Amino acid sequence: MTQPNKTLQDLVYIRLPSSFERNLGDFHIDPSIEIPVQLPAGKDSLESTEISIELLVAGMLKIIAFDAEHKNFGYYRDFVLAVQSDATKELNLAAISQEQKENYNFAEELFLTVNHLAPMSETFINLATFYSKRASLDTSKGTAYDFYQQKSMETLKEGVELFGDDAPLLSELGFFHLYQGNVEIAKEYLDRFLAVAEEGDKLEHVKKIMGDIDNKLHNDKLLMQAYDQIQMSKEEEALTNLEAYLVENPKVWNAWFLKGWAQRRLSRFADAEKAFLSCISLGESSSDIYNELAICALETDKKELAKNYLNTAIDLDEKNITLLSNLAHLHLQDGELDEAREFLELARNIDGKDPVIIRLMNDYEQTTGEKLSSPIVQQFVNTAEVMDKDNKKPFHIQGTEEGDDLEVSFEEDDTQE
């Protein structure tokens, strides 16, 4: 948006000759009041013979658009309306035309002028709609999007502050917040709309929307209650709330996750596993879900499945030291020493001082009789790059397909301390 200190730089002020004092209908021209004059493009001054009523009106319109706090704002507004009584309508049509031509800065100036010249709920809505259009042009939803959405909201709030419980403005502001995901704020404005709106299709539409909002807020409350109850070890109460929630919202994966979490804490591992699998069937995939599935599989004597779940969890969160140490522990338990060493090294590279990792290192050394020194660092290189090197360090290749990127483990000499 063009800032006032720049847009008003092309104005000069004059005083009309005393001979211009007269009445235009109910408006009195006062020659003692300075009048802003719009300088033509490329000029920094004007001869008296160049001053026209058009340039006078253009200057006053600039003040009306960008300096509503100007001491002579009311005088300029009344002057323009006295000279051209249909100025508001003409300027609004011009604003729409400039917006369609994508002359957005000029369109903004015109919409602002209309809104300040003859403020009505419609002019605030038109200006807010323009700002929302500007926001939508930033498809990345970056700084420009945030800036113009904020301008849109502020414009609607200003209208509500000026006109109070105006049904169109309350409706616009309610739906604005609903679109932004601010459901509780949207409800406040739409409740006010319902209190003042006249019978009609719009009223019925908002009533239906409000029913959906009330249902969502109620369900969200149930979900939060269930989470809090699990945290307080009230799993049975949480499950009661979750069952009620899932009747209305069977495709919300978060609810299935909380249900699985509560059941797992109650040692109902088979039921918990079904709940966590429901999360996956709904398209959700996270390391937390697969870690919970691994716990359930382990508790129901399906250790290999538990390892598979943990492998998937690590694929989704490869820096999670808990997942890595858990999988290293399972492989070590089963005597799968190469696999245990692989995940142990990955964990050591993240935090070699972690108490669990230190304990696992001791268990590994006691089991194998092998002394662990510096962590193994894994690098990924291209097959062609490896073959081009004349002086190669010893490496272990995991992968056999020609052209594949191969995983190469470089290991320090174990004899070095």
Image: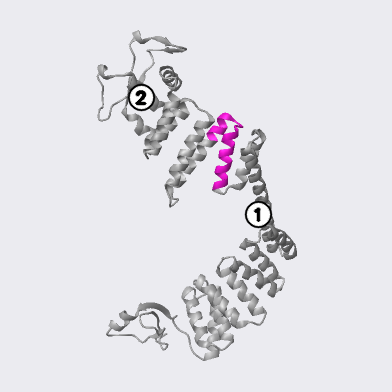
Tell whether position 278 is magenta.
no
Query: Residue at the location (64% across, 36% down)?
Result: 200
Vertical placement of residue 335 versus 217, above or below: below
Instruction: Write down the residue under mark 2.
Output: 59
Cβ atoms under marks 1 and 2 closer than 8 Å = no
Q: Circle 2: is it few (<14), some (14-19), or many (20+) Cα within 10 Å?
A: many
Percent of width and height locating residue 57: 37, 22
Q: Is residue 379 visible?
A: yes
Tag 1's secondary structure? helix
Position of the C terminus by quadrant: bottom left
Query: Residue at the location (45% across, 38% down)?
Result: 130
**In the picture, residue 412 is in which quadrant?**
bottom left
Does residue 21 appear to the left or right of 239 in the view shown? left
Vertical placement of residue 325 versus 210, above or below: below
Provide the residue span drawn in magenta.
157-179
Earlier in the chain: of badge 1 and badge 2, it is: 2
Tell whether position 174 is magenta.
yes
Tag 2's secondary structure? helix
Query: Residue at the location (63% across, 82% down)?
Result: 302
Query: Residue at the location (59% across, 65% down)?
Result: 282
What amino acid does circle 2 point to? Gly
Q: Residue 220 carries which label?
A: 1
Percent of width and height locating residue 147: 45, 44
Report, in whole angstroms, how far the alpha carbon at label 1 lies from the one at label 2: 54 Å
Give the prevailing secondary structure in the magenta stretch.
Answer: helix
**In the picture, residue 46 is in which quadrant?**
top left
Percent of width and height locating residue 158: 53, 33
Percent of width and height locating residue 157: 54, 36
Q: Which mark is residue 335?
A: none
